[in-house]
Structures are given as structure tokens and as C-alpha cells.
Amino acid sequence: MNISEKAAYLKGLMEGMKIDDSTNEGKLFKAIADLLEDISLSVLDLEDGQSYLEEYIDELDADLGEVERDVYECEDDDCDCCDCCDDDCDCDCDCDCDCFATVCPTCGEEVYFDADTEDDVIICPSCNTEIELEDIEDIEE
């Protein structure tokens, strides 16, 4: 039984008990039942909105994943290995990827960036820490 059904049940229970709404207690119970009904309708509206937003966020996440794959993919078409910029790549190929990796000093995650980046600072996608490229000693190609 959801919250709206429970509010309707309480209202029906009050009617079945023949609570006189001309008395002070009856007025109070009627006002409480009406308030519970309004609250239950508001909660149902919020649940519907949340469900819609969850679906929308899932769609955006999938679209963003496609954009990330398009933007950060390895540009060397001669390389037969997996995308060298992925975390899963364990190959030792000699492809000419202009992609470098370093470890974030804050969270320890590997951060990948283009070698030809003009920025002096990159942002860790995991913890949003700014990493200065001049200070990086352990850059791996």
C-alpha cells in the first residue's frame, strides 16, 4: 500500500467510525486527514519527478560516455591494440599516441591528458584536484 492509499484508508476509516466533524475533535481529525492526503499527493509528485530525472541523468551519462570516447580516443589508426588511453590497456605497443598518464597526488587515480595540451594545469576527473604539469616527474607515455 503506497502513501496515497494509506491516506485514503485513514479518511475512509474516519467516515466508517462516523466521527462527527462538528465537534472540535472531529474537526481536528478531518484537518489531519486532509493534510495527510495533500502530503501524500505531493510525495507522489516528487517520486514521479525523481524517476523522470533519474532516467534523464542515465541518458545524459550514456551520451557523455560517447562524447568522452570520441574526444579521448587514440588517434593512431595503425595501432591494432585497444585504446591506449584506456585504463584497461596493458599493451606495450609502439603506437604514436600523444596521450600521457600521471597519478593524481590527492586521490591516487591515473589521469590521462594530451601531450600537446597548452594548459599548465590539468584537473583530476575523480577529485577535481589541479595538477601542475611542470611538477610531474612520473609521466608515462
Image (cartoon, grey):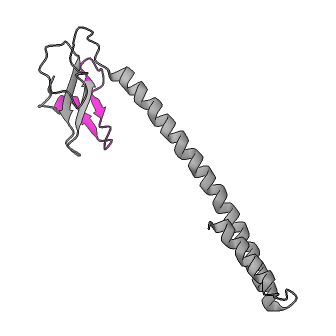
Q: Is residue 76 above or below residue 35?
A: above
> How many tags in the picture?
0
Foreground of the two, 127 or 74: 74
Q: Is residue 2 left or right of residue 27?
A: left
Q: Which residues are magenta?
A: 114-135
Tell me, yes or no, whether the highlighted magenta stretch contains residue 25: no
**Residue appearing at x 22%, y 31% in the figure:** 88
Q: Position of residue 70 (x, y in %)?
A: 38, 20
**Residue appearing at x 29%, y 13% in the figure:** 75
Foreground of the two, 66 or 126: 66
**Residue appearing at x 23%, y 8% in the figure:** 78
Q: Is residue 135 left or right of residue 25?
A: left
Extreme residue toward the right, this view: 22
Q: Quadrant of residue 84?
A: top left
Q: Quadrant of residue 103?
A: top left
Q: Quadrant of residue 55?
A: top right
**Residue appearing at x 82%, y 87% in the figure:** 18
Extreme residue toward the top, this view: 78
Question: Where the N terminus falls, by quadrant?
Answer: bottom right
Q: Is residue 98 above or below residue 25?
A: above
Question: Where the C terminus falls, by quadrant?
Answer: top left
Q: Position of residue 125 (x, y in %)?
A: 32, 37
Q: Is residue 77 above or below residue 15?
A: above
Q: Position of residue 39 (x, y in %)?
A: 68, 67
